[in-house]
Image: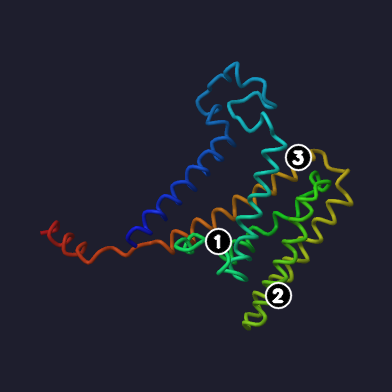
Amino acid sequence: WGGRGIWVGVALLLCAAVLFVLGMEEISWMQRVFGIATPEALKSNIQGEINFHNFATNQIGAAHKIVGFIVLVLLPFLFIVMPERLPLAGFTELVPSRAVALASAPLAAFNYNGWDSLFFQATTYLTLAIVLYFALLAWRERRYGEAMFCLLLTASIAGAQGLFLVQGDRFVRIWDVTEYKELFIAFGLFIWAVETFKRLAVPLPDAVPSLRRSIQA
């Protein structure tokens, strides 16, 4: 790996730091676990808890979901169709795969309370187009089961989004829709983490068996 390995390690640490902050913000930095009272400076946010994203919930929430779509769905697609145009030299092991995109794609169906935003509409339309492209690609590669899965996924996303738009006024809690969107973002991140671990896993050195024998002796 040499010097490239150092930069890959730095990239992984940065990703880990971002995910750690996101996770801790979501659980208010374990405030309820340890029974910590909210400091006065943070009581003015929407939930009155120890977190910062609730000072601008709508803006940060929208950014979280759009970035989630870009990283988990759009990036794998772009890497397949135009890998030479992406500035990812030396970091290809970290790029999410087609499997990550398909696992994350249902996030595009939960846009009822953000449908007035062109950005959220774009995530739905682009996701449908991307999954259809994956279906065509799988068919050309004679992976017919995957092609049919992609077609079923496309129909499910379109149908669910349409159902939400037609029946959305009956929701008891409108913000529940975005919770499901965040669920698929988290699921996609998990799949991405597993496949990245497998790609970067290094076999144990040959010296390990001899070391084990010496210990046993």
- Which residue does the image show at 66% across and 77% down from the upper left? 137
Q: Position of residue 104 (x, y in %)?
A: 64, 57
Q: Is residue 44 left or right of residue 112?
A: left
Residue drawn 60% across the image and 18% down it:
41
Q: Within 10 Å of the Cα at label 2, are there few (<14), some (14-19), or many (20+) other Cα atoms? A: some
- Residue 200 percent coordinates (x, y): 41, 61
User: Reading the chain from its start, which is encountered first: label 1 or label 2?
Assistant: 1
Which one is earlier in the sequence, the residue at label 3 or at label 2? 2
Mark 3–mark 2 Cα distance, whole angstroms, equals 32 Å
Image quadrant for the N terminus? bottom left
Q: State left or right for residue 49 relative to residue 173.
A: left
Looking at the image, the residue that sits furthest to the top is 40
Give how far across and how far down residue 53 sits, in percent. 63, 33
- The three-letter code of the residue at mark 3 reads Trp
Q: Nearer the viewer, residue 179 or 46?
A: 46
SS of the residue at dot 1? loop
Q: Which residue is mark 1?
A: 96
Tell me which amino acid carries mark 1. Pro
Question: Please, is residue 114 above or below residue 79 in the view?
Answer: above
Q: Is residue 109 or residue 69 the one in the foreground?
A: 69
Residue 175 is tagged as 3
Q: Earlier in the sequence, mark 3 or mark 1?
A: 1
Dividing the picture into quadrants, the one containing residue 109 is: bottom right
